[in-house]
Amino acid sequence: MAKQDPDLSLLFHALADPTRRAMLERLAQGPAAVTELAGPSGLRLPTILRHLSVLEAAGLITSAKDGRVRSCALNPTGLDPLRGWLDDQRAQWEARFDRLDDYVTRLMKERMP
Amino acid sequence: MAKQDPDLSLLFHALADPTRRAMLERLAQGPAAVTELAGPSGLRLPTILRHLSVLEAAGLITSAKDGRVRSCALNPTGLDPLRGWLDDQRAQWEARFDRLDDYVTRLMKERMP
DNA sequence: GTCTTGCTTAGCCATGTCGCTAACTATCAT
DNA sequence: ATGATAGTTAGCGACATGGCTAAGCAAGAC
């Protein structure tokens, strides 16, 4: 059970922090500079920068430096792997419940043919 | 930027570990006892138990003890908060891209009325 | 009763995470 | 050229996480 799916692990880990989720929601309103992202959080810049690098490593945002200001933006496809996993998971769960259904149905038929 | 949405944090954190995701996928096939869950992982029981408690705290599974064996099962609604968050997020992102669209459209109109 | 099985608890260790301060670099304004 | 602004890097400390072993307990098997 080694570390398969490192993407998913990075993604989930990035999303597990409320500060990072708040940063994402801020970015959903449009691109922002680092200081702007730090603003409402009350956290220091180095801390914010660390969070940014986690988000970027997870593929959730992109950032580019223009002059002395770094502009950060959402990566529109960043959440796709998560959505994919979620859909897979739901499919499996439903398959299972369908099998359970079949089973119950078969039981019923045996009892009242 | 305090720890709002503790549920989501627990949920994402629980899913950030490949071992735990593997356990979920095993449980998608049907309920299982602790030893059975530990089987393919090569990990010791106490370790597995720890993972189980994380999954349970996140609302992803339920477990009950029957005799001396604890049976674990998926909680069918466990992923709902995640799905909800994801949908919210997508809505926000799309709203943003729509506004961007409007903006571009307005620019175009100004240029060629 | 005794033994085995299946889980549980306690506690240790290595590593990772999240916050900070201090010091540095690079750009822009004057 | 000087100073202010915006990031950046290095490194520290507190705490969480993920693995383990050892020892305990409770339910079934014999």
Image (spheres, coloured by chain):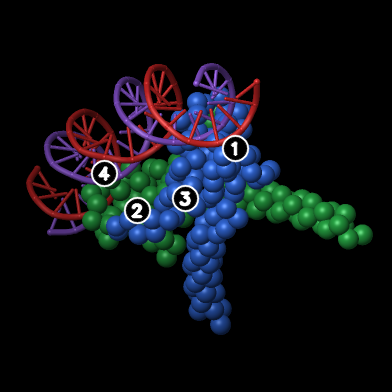
Chain colours: A green, B blue, C purple, D red
Q: Which residue is mark 1?
A: B33
For disc 4, the marked residue is A46
- How far separated are the C-alphas under marks 1 and 3? 19 Å
Say what amino acid the circle numbered 3 marks.
Answer: Ala
Q: Mark 2 and 1 residues: CB-CB less than 8 Å, in contact?
A: no
Residue B97, can we see it?
no
Compute the Cα span from label 3 to label 2.
19 Å
Q: Secondary structure at mark 4?
A: helix
The subunit carrying tag 1 is B
Q: Callout 3: helix, strand or loop?
A: loop
Q: Residue B58 bears which disc, if any?
A: 3
Badge number at residue A19 = 2
Against B13, residue A30 (above or below) is: below
Pointer 3 and pointer 2: residues touching (CB < 8 Å)?
Answer: no
**Amino acid under disc 4:** Pro
Residue B25 occupies quadrant: top right
Q: Position of residue B111 (x, y in %)?
A: 52, 76
Q: Real-space Cα distance between discs 2 and 1?
A: 36 Å
Which quarter of the image is occupied by the C terminus of chain B?
bottom right
Looking at the rendered structure, whether the residues under marks 1 and 3 are on a common chain is answered as yes
**Marks 3,4: beta carbons within 8 A:** no
User: Quick check: B99 above or below D10?
Assistant: below
Viewer-side label of 1, 4 = 1
Which of the chains bears the disc numbered 3? B
Q: Position of residue A5 (x, y in %)?
A: 57, 36
